[in-house]
Amino acid sequence: MSTAEILSRHNIKPSLMRVMIFDYLKENRTHPTVDDIYKALHPAVPTLSKTTVYNTVKLFVKSGITKMVTIEEQQSRFDGCTDLHGHFICSECGGVFDFETEEPIVSGLSDFEISTHDVYCSGICKNCKKN
Ligand SMILES: [Zn+2]
Ligand SMILES: [Zn+2]
């Protein structure tokens, strides 16, 4: 399915900027912030503003095609992969890495309604450990 089709299926009008931002999220599994996305795409699209990036990723999150990763208090990161997976944050380089996790990841909440399902770990990534 093309990006434009995915967006249309979620009732999002596939404008050029929206397609570019969604493609960027799909291709860059680095969990970029709004700033990161803006800095990466702005050279190619000088008319792009940070507000557009912000509003676009908010729209994607609302539509369920992007996940917001709030692993740090100061900033939100965005993830084009919405399948269940955990996030590891490196305290040295600040990198956020995906790891596999299996359902069910919680027990003892059978009468509760769970709306978000996030697994976070932190430590030192393998690249930083080498140095
Ligand atoms: Zn690291
Ligand atoms: Zn992720």
Image: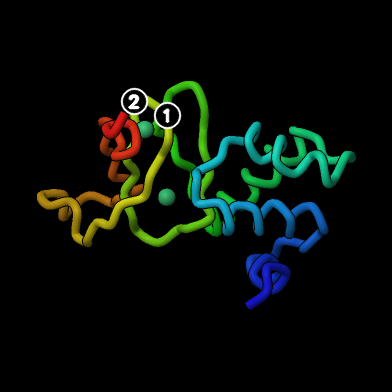
Q: Estimate the spatial distance between the alpha carbons at disc 1 and disc 2, rounded to whole Å.
A: 6 Å
Under mark 1, the amino acid is: Gly
| Image height of 97 relative to 14, above or below | above
Residue 33 position by quadrant: top right
Q: Nearer the viewer, residue 55 or 100?
A: 100
Q: Nearer the viewer, residue 8 or 86?
A: 86
Q: Secondary structure at mark 2?
A: loop
Image quadrant holding the N terminus, namely: bottom right
Residue 15: percent from left, percent from top: 81, 59
Q: For the point 62% across and 43% down, which residue is it?
A: 58
Tell me, yes or no, if residue 102 can be seen here: yes
Q: Residue furthest top?
A: 74
Labelled disc at residue 131? none
Residue 67: percent from left, percent from top: 49, 49
Q: Which residue carries the number 1 mark? A: 94
Q: Which residue carries the number 2 mark? A: 91
| Image height of 97 relative to 24, above or below | above
